[in-house]
Image (spheres, rainbow, N blue to C red):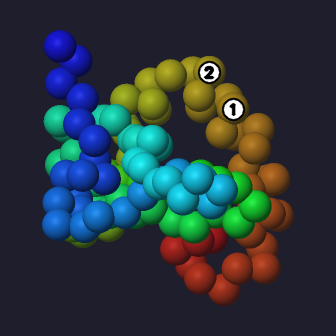
Amino acid sequence: MYSLHDVWRKKNNDKKQFSWRSKSFKVQCKLDYFLISTNLVKLCQRCEIIYAPHSDHSAIGLVLISESLNRKPGSGFWKSNASLLEDNTYIKEIQSNIKAFREKYDYAEDKGLK
């Protein structure tokens, strides 16, 4: 119905691990899950069961990597939005802050930062 997946099972198909243990009854099972959508499964880098001290449950760690983070960055060339130069409020705001900006970055040797 909601197309949710146990991401730990998807990423660890061949492993047999448990997220809950009862020492007194010597029972263990997998009670804890991350259920995520199909789109998020594609973004999952890893999912693992991690020992959690002082608890009968283990933690489940999930690492998702955004598609935008996987893209190579552009050239790094900065472009100004020229239409802002037609906005009088913006122009007045910039003019009133130029002195503060200069003082704030006065220490900088990098001309690009200045």
Q: Residue at x 17, y 36 (%)?
A: 38
Where's residue 17, x and y in %? 37, 63
Q: Residue at x 54, y 59 (%)?
A: 26
Q: Residue furthest bottom?
A: 109
Describe residue 87's horizontal placement relative to residue 109 as left or right.
left
Q: Residue furthest top?
A: 1
State the image quarter where residue 90 is shown.
top right
Give the vertical position of 66 relative to 110 (above or below): above
Secondary structure of residue under mark 2: helix
Q: Residues within 10 Å of mark 1 (few under 14, many from 20)?
A: few
Q: Residue furthest front?
A: 25
Contact between labelled residues 2 and 1, with CB atoms less than 8 Å apart: yes
Q: Is residue 86 visible?
A: yes
Describe residue 10's horizontal placement relative to residue 60 as left or right.
left
Q: Tell me the tag on residue 93.
A: 1
Q: Amino acid at mark 2?
A: Thr
Residue, disc 2: 89
Describe residue 104's horizontal placement relative to residue 75 as left or right.
right
In which quadrant will I find the N terminus?
A: top left
Q: Tell me the tag on residue 32.
A: none
